[in-house]
Image (tube, rainbow, N blue to C red):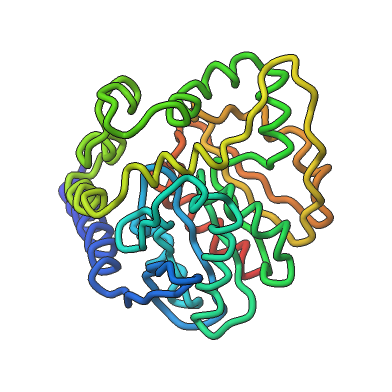
Amino acid sequence: MTRLGLVLIIVLAVVGAASAQDVFDRVEHSYADNDGVRIHYASLGEGPLVVMIHGFPDFWYTWRDQMAALSSEYHVVAVDLRGYNRSDKPDGVAAYAMPNHLADIAAVIQHTGEESATIVGHDWGGAVAWSFALTHPEMTNKLVILNLPHPNGLARELRTNPQQYENSAYARTFQEKDPDDPTVLFGRPMTPETLAFWVTDPDARARYVEAFERSDFAGMLNMYKANYPGGKPGDDLPPPAPKATMPVLMFHGLNDTALLSGALNNTWDWLEKDLTLVTVPGAGHFVQQDASELVTTTMQWWIGR
């Protein structure tokens, strides 16, 4: 490699790191109220509204690269789910039932002064995003899903694919155990440090640990206790979810062992409009970070079409 090439790589790495750092420092922090529960969101940019919803274990900062790029054309809002980081942490499993999360997202959209948005979700945020789009189509302009199959696909795979059922054992553990169980998190205790196990960047990891110190571990598990779909091999399929009525963009990191790619099959049968499906070899469950450039540039193109 030439000296010039090495210099360019170093400069690009520094610029990329600075961009993410700037997002953390540049965002505006706001709170929407849903029946007394305050939902924190970080926002950046001006333009049509894009609402981004994280999964487990995560917080708004997971979208830092996408926020940095999209904010040049859009008002990008990244939510902390209830129980996480700066959002309120109500007690009890019922407080984390899906209708409450949907009302949280509606409250955020309304708090921005808008009536609808492009909804983006990853993992549990993807489950919230699917459910929001299906129940609030008038508030959902477009839908972007990362590593979370359509509800019909996941329900089918849990009942017909023994490997998916086996790989979902962690979710049943989360449903059955409490956060103080020393083996609850993949055989380890649940702490801010262990929850950040998947974050590879040391600077980002420090922010995650800080966010998880503010989070409610019981609330995180209550999401599973209240909402993770049941079903085992041999069970009958549940009634299908209604068709989504807006365009859908899906990303799926093919190295995801928690949610296997077989659940993507037939997604097109459950949509009324177009589906753009991007499968990403070499990327895992956190595809928005594992393949950040691909996800970000594709999202920019697709939302702006």
Give the residue drawn at x 57%, y 36%.
228
Foreground of the two, 196 or 192: 192
Residue 119 sits above or below residue 283 on the image:
below
Asked whether residue 225 appears in the rendered view, the answer is yes
Give the residue drawn at x 33%, y 58%.
61
Residue 16 point in image, percent of width and height: 28, 58
Marks counted in the figure total 0
Residue 55 sits above or below residue 47 on the image:
above
229 sits left or right of 237 in the view: left
Residue 141 point in image, percent of width and height: 68, 69
Residue 140 point in image, percent of width and height: 67, 67
124 sits left or right of 66 in the view: right
Asked whether residue 5 appears in the rendered view, the answer is no
Foreground of the two, 255 or 96: 96
Give the residue drawn at x 31%, y 20%.
187
187 sits left or right of 264 in the view: left
Residue 45 point in image, percent of width and height: 42, 79
Residue 36 occupies which quadrant of the picture? bottom left
Foreground of the two, 224 or 44: 224
